[in-house]
Image (cartoon, rainbow, N blue to C red):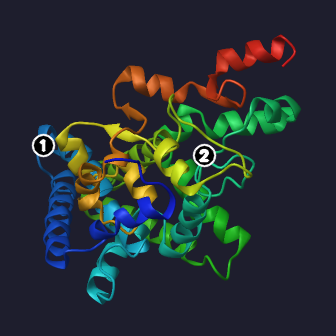
């Protein structure tokens, strides 16, 4: 390659990959949903504990994969014009309390403002600069730290999804986001019916824990995909769509098993360059487009997780994220 492509030329290079193989989509969806239902059944039914507990974990992880189908449907990357495909995948959105109307609104805003400083944090974890932190009120600082705190992701079932995805949007716009309460009712009814027929343990292992695990994994994945040590962010005046995709979205290294369970969404820089590329073609697009070969990376290793969670605020002068200790030291020294 003589000169790296940029702008619209680079986006156009992804067009050959933004084509769905409908037969492949159906095959992958049937397998993923069958795997998920099987693990949910093993966790719910009175099987031995050494079967139920691992099945509960695998049910949650397999739901993450199924959620990626819903995610791609909302991007119109797969199942366009397929009523059955649309209906069956949207069920997963309701089961995880992120119904279509709410998810699409927040996620579209996220893609249009990926890692853009001084922009609304709808659908994203907020990022502030050192200067912004300096003038923030104590209550604003507390809220910022709380949103980026690991506990917010671990308990994402309650914070990110129940409150953030289902209740909050409904309170803001009841007419548009009536699906939020419907998703909560579906979740509570599912748990109550399983508890009534199979007992409290089944309700916990067969409903609550898998959903809690799926939302926790999803909450952290979404964070680390746009909050990693080598990220580069820009303010509104300098923000560029391609730059945000390639330098503010990570490649998440993980095992092939975890890539399968997370629906290949670890190739996130490719997804942000063109969200019409089906998830199962993201790896292919990265391999075929040289400009996508050198993104910022992270992984599930404790060292990388800790590094991502320790990121606090953007320093425009140093062009990097400061850690919480560095930010506090900067403030103690007068900013």
Q: Which residue is denoted by mark 2 in the rendering?
A: 125
Residue 93, position as x, y percentages in the image: 41, 68
Is residue 266 something one can see in this rendering? Answer: no
In the rendered image of this protein, does residue 213 appear above or below residue 199? above
Q: Residue at image x 31%, y 75%?
A: 78
Q: Residue at image x 34%, y 49%?
A: 204
Look at the image and tell me in which quarter the C terminus lies.
top right
In the rendered image of this protein, does residue 287 appear above or below residue 34? above
Residue 29, position as x, y percentages in the image: 20, 69
Q: Quadrant of residue 319?
A: top right
Q: Residue at image x 32%, y 89%?
A: 81
Is residue 220 something one can see in this rendering? Answer: yes
Q: Secondary structure at mark 1?
A: helix
Foreground pick, 87 / 187: 87
Point out which mark residue 51 bears.
1
Sequence-first disc among 1 and 2:
1
In the drawing, does residue 239 fall left or right of residue 190?
right
């Amino acid at each position: 390659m003589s000169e790296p492509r940029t702008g619209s030329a680079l986006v156009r290079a992804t067009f050959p990959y933004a084509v769905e193989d409908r037969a492949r989509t159906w095959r992958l969806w049937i397998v993923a949903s069958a795997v998920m239902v099987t693990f949910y059944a093993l966790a719910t039914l009175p099987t031995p504990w050494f079967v139920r507990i691992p099945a509960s974990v695998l049910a949650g992880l397999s739901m993450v994969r199924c959620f990626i189908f819903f995610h791609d449907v909302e991007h119109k990357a797969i199942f366009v014009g397929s009523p059955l495909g649309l209906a069956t995948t949207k069920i997963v959105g309701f089961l995880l309390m992120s119904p279509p109307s709410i998810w699409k609104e927040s996620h579209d805003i996220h893609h249009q403002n990926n890692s853009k400083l001084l922009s609304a944090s709808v659908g994203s974890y907020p990022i502030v600069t050192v200067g912004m932190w300096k003038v923030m009120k104590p209550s604003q600082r507390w809220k910022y730290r709380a949103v980026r705190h690991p506990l917010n992701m671990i308990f994402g079932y309650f914070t990110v999804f129940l409150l953030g995805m289902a209740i909050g949007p409904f309170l803001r716009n009841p007419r548009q986001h009536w699906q939020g309460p419907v998703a909560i009712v579906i979740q509570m009814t599912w748990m109550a019916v399983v508890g009534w027929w199979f007992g409290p343990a089944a309700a916990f292992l067969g409903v609550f824990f898998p959903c809690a695990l799926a939302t926790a994994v999803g909450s952290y994945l979404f964070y680390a995909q746009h909050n990693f040590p080598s990220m580069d962010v820009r303010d509104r005046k300098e923000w560029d769509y391609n730059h945000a995709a390639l330098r503010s979205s990570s490649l998440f290294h993980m095992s092939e098993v975890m890539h399968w369970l997370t629906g290949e969404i670890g190739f996130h820089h490719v997804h942000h360059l063109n969200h019409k590329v089906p998830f199962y073609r993201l790896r292919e697009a990265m391999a075929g487009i040289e400009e996508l070969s050198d993104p910022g990376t992270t992984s599930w290793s404790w060292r990388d997780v800790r590094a991502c969670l320790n990121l606090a605020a953007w320093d425009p002068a140093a062009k990097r994220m400061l850690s919480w200790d560095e930010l506090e030291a900067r403030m103690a020294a007068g900013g």
